[in-house]
Amino acid sequence: MPVIPKINKITNIKSPSYKYKVLSNNVPIYIIHDDTLPIVKLEVIFSGGRVSEKKRSTSRITAGMMNESTQSTSAKKIDETIDFYGGRMGISSNMDTMTASLFCLKKHFKSLISLFGEIISQPKFDSKELQTYIKNQKQRLQLSLEENDIIAYREMTANVFGKKHVYGYNSTFEDYDAIESKDLQSYFQNNFVKENCFVVASGNIGDDEFKLIDSVLCDTLLSDANFQKPIYSPVNFIQPEEIFIEKKNSVQTAIRIGLKTFTKTHSDYPAFYFLNTVLGGYFGARLMQNIREQKGYTYNVFSSLNTMIYDGFFSIGCEVGNEHKNATIKEIFFEIDKLKAELVSEQEMELVQNFLMGEILKWTDGVYHSADMIKHLVIQEQPISYFETFVEDLQKVSAKDLQGMAQKYFKKGAFHTVIVGK
């Protein structure tokens, strides 16, 4: 008979190795090196996002327009240059940050980094290009507003954080129409400065690549000696309620159930992270076993713990046949109440812990995953050692801890519920 290999628990996960340096202009840089790869990835991460806005949607549109033309290079020429060298380059924006990234073969890094520096320092914000960009964004928004799950997500965040809060507002056609080139230029000058960023370089980063990074970013990054980080406005309490949005022609109903939680720095984060996984954070989770496998109400049901720099929220979501919406909501709260009333079995605790350790291994699987993990820790203003502390905390979570988290946060009347459909 074949011998079945012994399965060992994952118990010792170490933080990835990296080098910390400071560029000549005092911008910190984290280098994750792997000389077996012919590829280089460079990221410049700027803090701010929505928190830095003086007008709604400016952070996202500023980032989007920076992917267009610069003061001296047209959008067409930029695209042709990137395509010629087979690279990727662009600016992205989320709630808390804007990230400029360059990804290319090591041998083409020198040919592309100057253009990268130009993009992050000399955006044109051409008014005609802005009109075209706004038109395209409005078309995308129009299509998005036909999708029940997107409507439900937008309504959920608006109710958890407040419709005027930076984490709660939803972009509208009116927001887009109100944006002018001068708004983007102002946002850019106030936020895309060396005092507001750090750099992550990963892949085959040798001395020559580091010198190029140092030279280009020192020459191109703007400076603001008076720069100050924006002040975050805390969320006011909003009474949870159930909201139904009717879509008469819908075949399916989208359901979102959630509540405001906390950031990754909160002491309850590791145990709640474990609890979320048990409830709906992986394919074998309780919600999936009940609502998909046993009841057949949906193809996919999930729960997620969403964390930003200053706040966070927990959410359960799925799409079901219209005739199953009430039964699905009943089963969701059945599973929530069960976590409050009963201890998770030792067998399930071990299963989920093994799953989590396997998932966490992926966070450090290769140089680019490692770079992403380091980037997110720096964004959250956590030491890199937090990674190992988090792993240790997860391994200490007990069934009693999970029950305590459920009883503490999953209180009756604590959940916002959004139903979009027929």
Image (cartoon, rainbow, N blue to C red):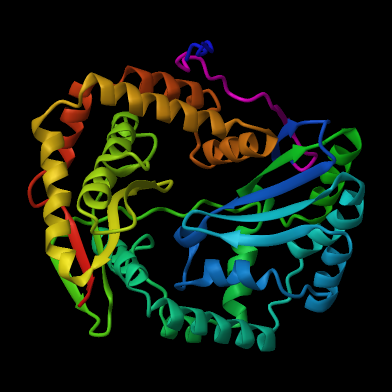
Q: Is residue 397 above or below residue 362?
A: above
Q: What quarter of the picture does the C terminus occupy?
A: bottom left
Q: Residue 84, percent across and down?
A: 89, 65
Q: Across the whole image, how many numbered discs are drawn on residues?
A: 0
Chief secondary structure of the magenta portion: loop
- Give the left or right position of residue 399, taking residue 100 as reference: left
Identify which residue is drawn at 76% across, 51% down: 103
Q: Nearer the viewer, residue 325 or 409?
A: 325
The answer to whether residue 407 is seen in the rendering is no
Identify which residue is drawn at 91% across, 38% down: 208
Q: Residue 397, percent across and down?
A: 29, 21
Q: Which residues are magenta?
A: 8-25
Assess whether residue 150 is covered by the magenta stretch. Answer: no
- Give the left or right position of residue 382, taking residue 91 as reference: left
Q: Nearer the viewer, residue 249 or 134?
A: 249
- Give the left or right position of residue 129, taking residue 149 as reference: right
Query: On the image, which quarter does residue 17 sit in?
Result: top right
